[in-house]
């Protein structure tokens, strides 16, 4: 069953990792997909692999003008918008030397939280006529204490955002949800040994794959989740069940 036949999805961070897997999954289920990313060359490669109508659009979620232009280009190309998936992001502390103090908090918040707001505000006018769906990628770090504080707090703030947006826009039929993954094997983890060692903290004894997350995103974006809005869905291999599985 193709749940997204005739529908159009705009996926940020879709050139790599979880975003790429989401674009591929939605396309496999019939969606036309805008692969939106700062890495345009890799986005174009993803589009070439989709096998459905798609476009690569340059999109930097830290710039309102860039996000607005990318969404506008998508609607111009396909004539409608049904699904926004905001995936782009990372823990800045893992990728660059972030100054301590205010800078590390404000920069991460602007990237993770305000970045999602920019995408939602650009997409929402187009999602109302289609009674569309928004799915944000949060993090299990925003649910339990596991990770760098500015990143975790910014991801946690998304849960409040979707609850409020779900309440505000429920009457217009637009739904807002979050998928909160734990460890997923992407380029975010450069050392395979780290992923190998992390298996032990998961009751299911493996880390996640991008497809595990894409499947949950596709569910929440689809009509199968028509009566679900405002939630944060952990996709975490049982991590938050507690430490019982570590005690024999
Ligand atoms: N990998 C994990 O273990 C994990 C766990 C929990 C949450 N997440 C979240 O999942 C999302 C994707 O992570 P991933 O592991 O697939 O990372 P990734 O680095 O593989 O992919 C991230 C994508 O975002 C793009 N991107 C980066 N900055 C951007 C910007 N300013 N505007 C637009 N695109 C930008 C990158 O080019 C890349 O294509 C992130 O929001 C991350 O916080 C990841």
Image (tube, rainbow, N blue to C red):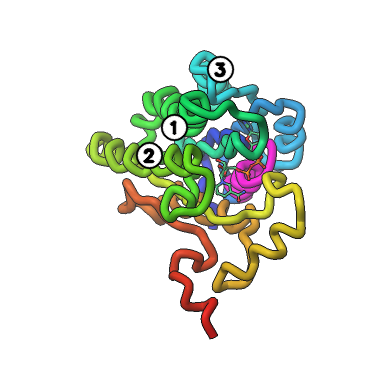
Q: Tell me the number on the disc at residue 113.
A: 1
State the quadrant of the C terminus: bottom right
Q: Residue at x 44, y 70 (%)?
A: 242
Q: Examine the structure image and report whether residue 18 is included in the region drawn in magenta.
A: yes
Helix, strand or loop for disc 2: helix
Q: Nearer the viewer, residue 24 or 206?
A: 206
Name the N-terminal-most of marks 2 and 1.
Answer: 1
- Mark 1 vs 3: CB contact within 8 A: no
- The residue sitting at 45% across, 36% down in the picture is 82
Mark 3 residue's CB less than 8 Å from ligand 1:
yes
Q: CA distance from mark 1 to mark 3?
A: 16 Å
Label 3 or label 2, whichever lies nearer to me, is 2
Q: Which residue is at the front of the view, 23 or 108? A: 108
User: Residue furthest toward the front?
Assistant: 101
Q: Earlier in the sequence, mark 3 or mark 2?
A: 3
Contact between marks 2 and 1 (CB within 8 A): the answer is yes
- Above or below, 18 against 235 in this view is above
**Label 1's element?**
helix
Is the residue 226 above or below the residue 61 in the image? Answer: below
Query: Dot 2 corresponds to which residue?
Result: 157
The answer to whether residue 32 of the structure is visible from this angle is: no
The crowding category of the residue bearing disc 3, from other C-alpha atoms within 10 Å (few below 14, some 14 to 19, many at least 20), is some
Can you give x and y, in whole percent of width and height, for residue 226 in the image?
35, 51
Mark number displayed over residue 66 = 3
> In the rendered structure, which segment of residues is drawn in magenta?
14-28
- Rendered location of residue 17, percent (x, y): 67, 45
Residue 232: horizontal and vertical position, in percent?
Answer: 39, 51
Residue at image x 44%, y 23%?
A: 122
């Amino acid at each position: 069953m193709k749940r997204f036949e005739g529908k159009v999805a705009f996926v940020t961070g879709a050139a790599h990792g979880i975003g790429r897997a989401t674009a591929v999954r939605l396309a496999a289920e019939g969606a036309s997909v805008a692969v939106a990313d700062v890495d345009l060359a890799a986005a174009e490669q993803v589009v070439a692999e989709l096998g459905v109508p798609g476009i690569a659009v340059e999109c930097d979620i830290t710039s309102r003008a860039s996000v607005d232009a990318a969404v506008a280009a998508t609607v111009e190309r396909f004539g409608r918008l049904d699904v926004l998936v905001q995936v782009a992001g990372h823990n800045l502390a893992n990728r660059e030397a972030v100054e301590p103090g205010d800078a590390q908090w404000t920069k991460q918040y602007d990237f993770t939280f305000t970045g999602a707001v920019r995408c939602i505000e650009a997409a929402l006018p187009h999602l109302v006529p289609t009674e569309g769906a928004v799915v944000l990628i949060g993090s299990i770090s925003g649910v339990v204490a596991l990770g760098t504080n500015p990143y975790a707090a910014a991801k946690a703030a998304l849960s409040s955002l979707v609850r409020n947006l779900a309440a505000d826009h429920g009457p217009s039929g637009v739904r807002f949800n979050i998928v909160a993954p734990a460890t997923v094997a992407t380029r975010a983890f450069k050392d395979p040994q780290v992923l190998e060692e992390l298996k032990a903290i998961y009751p299911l004894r493996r880390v996640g794959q991008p497809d595990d997350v894409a499947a949950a995103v596709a569910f929440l974006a689809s009509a199968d989740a028509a009566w679900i809005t405002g939630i944060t869905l952990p996709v975490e291999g049982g991590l938050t069940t507690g430490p019982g599985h570590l005690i024999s």
